[in-house]
Amino acid sequence: MKQRQDLNWTVGWSDDIDAQPAEMVAAVVPGAVQLDWARAHGWPDYTYADNWREYRWMEDVYWTYRTKLAILEAGKDEQICLVCGGVDYKFLVRINDRVVHRQEGMFTPSELDLTRVSSGDILEIVIYPAPKSQLEHDDRSQANQSCKPAASYGWDWHPRLIPLGIWEDTYIEVRSRHRLRHAETFYDLSDDFLTANLRVNTHFGDDFSGRLQWTVTDDAGDIQLSASTEITSAVEKLNGTIDAPRLWWPNGEGEAVLYTSRLELFGDDGRLLDTRTQRIGFRRVRLIEHPGTWGEPSEFPKSRSNPPITLEINGRPIFGKGSNWVNEGIFPGVMNAESYRRLLERAHQANFNLLRIWGGGPANKESFFDICDEMGLLVWQEFPLACNNYLGTPEYLKVLDQESRSIILRLRQHPSLAIWCGGNELFNAWSRMTDQSPALRLLAANCYNMDPKTPFLMTSPVEGMGHGNYVFRDSAGKEVFQMFRNASCTAYTEFGCPGPSPVDYLKTFIPEEDLFPPRPGTAWETHHAFNAWVGPTWLELPTIEAYFGPSPNLETLVERGTWLQVEGYKCLFEEARRQKPRCSMALNWCFNEPWPTAANNSLISWPCEPKPAYHAVASACRVSLASARVSKFSWREGDVFSPELWILHDDPNPLASGRLVASIEFGGSETVLLNWDFPEIAPSVNLPGPILRFMLPHAGADRISLILRVEGRPDLDSRYDLLYTPSHSAVEPTAHAPTMNI
Amino acid sequence: MKQRQDLNWTVGWSDDIDAQPAEMVAAVVPGAVQLDWARAHGWPDYTYADNWREYRWMEDVYWTYRTKLAILEAGKDEQICLVCGGVDYKFLVRINDRVVHRQEGMFTPSELDLTRVSSGDILEIVIYPAPKSQLEHDDRSQANQSCKPAASYGWDWHPRLIPLGIWEDTYIEVRSRHRLRHAETFYDLSDDFLTANLRVNTHFGDDFSGRLQWTVTDDAGDIQLSASTEITSAVEKLNGTIDAPRLWWPNGEGEAVLYTSRLELFGDDGRLLDTRTQRIGFRRVRLIEHPGTWGEPSEFPKSRSNPPITLEINGRPIFGKGSNWVNEGIFPGVMNAESYRRLLERAHQANFNLLRIWGGGPANKESFFDICDEMGLLVWQEFPLACNNYLGTPEYLKVLDQESRSIILRLRQHPSLAIWCGGNELFNAWSRMTDQSPALRLLAANCYNMDPKTPFLMTSPVEGMGHGNYVFRDSAGKEVFQMFRNASCTAYTEFGCPGPSPVDYLKTFIPEEDLFPPRPGTAWETHHAFNAWVGPTWLELPTIEAYFGPSPNLETLVERGTWLQVEGYKCLFEEARRQKPRCSMALNWCFNEPWPTAANNSLISWPCEPKPAYHAVASACRVSLASARVSKFSWREGDVFSPELWILHDDPNPLASGRLVASIEFGGSETVLLNWDFPEIAPSVNLPGPILRFMLPHAGADRISLILRVEGRPDLDSRYDLLYTPSHSAVEPTAHAPTMNI
């Protein structure tokens, strides 16, 4: 039916688009020219120390992929085609020096008819230097007139290393001329979710007669719908109904049920010419207002009420728990189903139901969404705009129009795809775009025209939502405990708490002589421990020393920094959840990272090594848990320790009544402070409990731990580890720790 | 070339769409069925007392317009066409009982080929009952599933009277088959405004050869551009350039220069077949941020900066001064260039540069925009959505799509058209639409796709902007003086201060026996003096009595209410202007009214009788003026009277230095309080001046007047009349006036 031929590619560079590369090396497709070149020349790992600097020149030259076409025989009614999933970024295609295709934009696939090409002909894909709108500022602003993801121009967790190359599957296909040029299954769910009306739109070539067969099977493989038609025009539509469809639910809310729509195209002779399958998850997604929205504003002159940000799936409001996904690696060409799955399994295990695919990175490959569909992970997908003012020049708008249409067309049928978003932080001082920016008006129009049922946001944050902060303690001494207690956002779509990477991991990319003490000017800095963002990010040495004093060795330093990250993230996620239903989303910055960082807000070290904070966040995102609102991190003898007790409960089922036992552990002993007999809790509602009050006695300890246990339900138990200082203490290591006065 | 034949219409009603009306009466087209029926039956004026109630049944029946077609001869290559500008609201067209057209929506014109129709044939336009989404609530919410303007379903200044009928020009046209089916001139201005690149897109029928001639003339009639082409395809484009075009400026900023683009279509025989003219005003309009936008928000978690609302014309920020325009009358069919011009001249004379065409009324006819183009009045045009939740059913979206496209296509080339807006107050509690509402996403997409250079707002207000309040003093006793001093909106796009209509005017529609004292349950109430909106609107008797005590007669009452409206509006406009540049717009509610009101926020009584408040607003909107920030309305002996002096200056030219003399007049004598020698003032910048401090002495007076005179510039002088009460006074009429303690 279809026959695929992979190609053997070589790649080389030149300073001029018409010059022959002086040297060609073997290329892996999909991949990146940088990886090919480094592999061929035996370069050391780009992730180690400052090796990445060696790659800098590669962004400014022309790269030519070359392959010699082998003998291909096209039968009658057959076509030989180059199927190119995507080239990063601007390129042309030549056959024997004749230009046959030009394109700017990595997200738009292309196809080239090679039927008349001869065996032995040379096919070349020539890639232009990385796009730069200007040369004065060597940073992300160079990406502000292209659809090239901006992170690779350098970010506070990403080295300056701009990938180029054939990044999506690219091959020769021999296929029937009579095929499904486009085939897509749509559905409408009735308001009571009891009926799904499906329709399939197909497009063939002209002058073809044959038969189209359509079946939809459920997850057990049973046929739920079947229809067929004789083909009488170039466009055929089929309709069908499924009663009482099993709905697709996000993680923690139910099963992510997937059906399969299968189309088969038969010729007049009964021969199967083409097939297409598409998975369907029946669900309705909306953004709705939080309770109380319409009571605001209350005074004249009245402005508007906040925009809605609560995800409603199948009529049920969902608290969005998850994280910001950045590019999985520096080179998108090597991302694949396996690497996606490894990370997505971690997201699923962390009880996440929502990932924000941040606009500074690329839209992921198809397999990413397939896995999210399976795992019930909702996706907030941004277009490739981030922290820049993307001016609406005609040239830019043309590429953005093309690229956004390609992305929408590719992803709109995935049940996981829950929100389209113009890009990251575009309405803030560092970007200065507005609701009137042509680029965002274009994206709004394309999303509505092509996918009207999926919510669209121009950017994040919009009014009511919040981004930041990204530190455990800000420059004014305010900790996450106070900062978020006093915030009242409708969604926290970015917030972070940095932590160092584990010691063994640090040793893999920081030369031994630089390991301790960490210093600027070493691999610590290029791996983002120093001078990455504002203040002493991301290692935050002054904060660590403010609590603990100087660290005697790397292990202690990492342990202390990790402690802050762990407790900070617990506080952040649980506080956001306590603010439900006004707040309906908690997405930390960030989930993963594209290369090894020495310190970062990430939960998972590259490529997929969970940090202790990952487990803390997974715990804080349990569907239900015992939780405490703690007012600060550092405590001393004589302080009245007064955490508020809560049961956080996102489960769509009620939680049985029970007993929560709160105890404090320090100096090696545990004291029960309170038993709280809580009643049955209604579905998806949090229950505030009593406030403990306990004067901290003297103890020879450097920490206190609040332990919450729910009798018979150890899965709900929680623990908070806080700093403790006895009066007149000489206990190490807190001797030099100033007590926070907040 | 073209030959027009007007038709003689009759109209009658029936309960059933297929039933013949029992009685046909003469109809005026364009017009309204209500007016025809009332005229034929000698009904008294609908504006008098409660006469409007008699019209209620008319909204629920079918109305049939009928005409007998006369002999029409179509030559070879000619076509006979029914050209119908618009029918309000849902209708069908029948010829001899055969339905030839069906339509919902008043803003979409239609054309019917009548070439094959015989003389004597009967043409009927049958109008359906007024659309109602439900019958339980007899109010504006009935309009929430249609594009019928909502005001006529009853508003706080509009009786329940829903117009129906042929409301736009409708006639028979004999014309060449070879004609300009569509012809539109577009332009791009260079960033330095020194070059205008024009292009004209035309569309003909197929199989036509001939010549297209294009000229663009300036306002002196001189040809600035000329081009022609032989027609070789159904679509022809022409391009041209005008160097150093004279720009179009809004009122107060420069001249509203108009060019004329003229297209002529010639046949092969040289015969002129069709022409089209379009006026062009070269200007660039944008919404930009106010200074300081990017400094907000300043704290984590950070939300977005406010959306831009400052109008920038040709690179110059403009303070938008103007008003909200409501439907000019109850029956849009009788609006015409003359009635528009009468009101628009008043807007122009009031120094307005911006009118918000409120979404509760209809989009005006073409002539309205022609006059705005000429007068330099910017138009903020809303689609017909107001104060409802317009749910995105497929049926509604289909009509909205059609109607919005028609409106955009008709108006997009008018230089006056400055802002598209989805509708009124849609993001507030009483509407409950959001950024995710399909109707607004559709309008955003259509505006971007069809008119990307014109700013689009989903609604008013959005964040930063404010609507309200609409009273001189709110229920908590706060006056406009305090309310707006403490507000900091980026734009005040609705605010009002009610006042009674003049005595002579009241006598024209309130029966004499009801004139005094005003009471609910009389024509005062149906003409909106009582129970119109929240509180004792719009006469606001308790407020008048709180300041002045009971009024002995109608004249005194009207004088007092008018005083409050006059001083309230002065304060409101001037305070908004003082808040420039953070604030960049002041549009009061409302400019006009559709029928006589007994009391209203309007500046002009129906049809075009300026109230004293109109003149106060005109004065407050002078390009430059001396102004005072006064803290309250009611003063007493011993108070320290301490107005802040300002020069408000929107002129794009500097204001020469000068001397402002501030004096106070009361008890018949005037005392100079201060001479302020102010320096030259830069273009478009306000200048704050000194704060007066003057202890009010005893006087036998009931008012104090602050008089500001600028030596040699009487056009800048201002005056504020405030209430005064001597201690232990027995002076009438303030004996019972409680002094405001604020």
Image: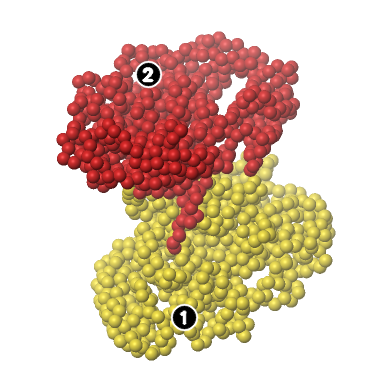
Chain colours: A red, B yellow
For image coordinates 58% across by 33% down, the residue present is: A248
Give the side of residue A742 with respect to residue B520, left or right: left
Give x and y (percent) for residue A480. 32, 42
Is residue B288 rendered to the left or right of residue B163?
left
The chain letter for the residue carrying disc 1 is B
Residue depicted at 73% across the width and 58% down the height? B128
- Residue A662: in sight, yes or no? yes
Can marks 2 and 1 be said to lie on one chain?
A: no
Residue A89 x/y as whole percent: 43, 27
Element under label 2?
helix
- Tell which subunit mark 2 falls on: A
Q: Which mark is residue B545?
A: 1
Q: Amino acid at mark 1?
A: Glu
On the image, numbered disc 2 is attached to which residue? A35
Front position among marks 2 and 1: 1
Amino acid under label 2? Leu
Q: CA distance from mark 2 to mark 1?
A: 84 Å
Q: Residue at x 39, y 43 (%)?
A: A645
Out of A184 and A631, give the one closest to the viewer. Answer: A631
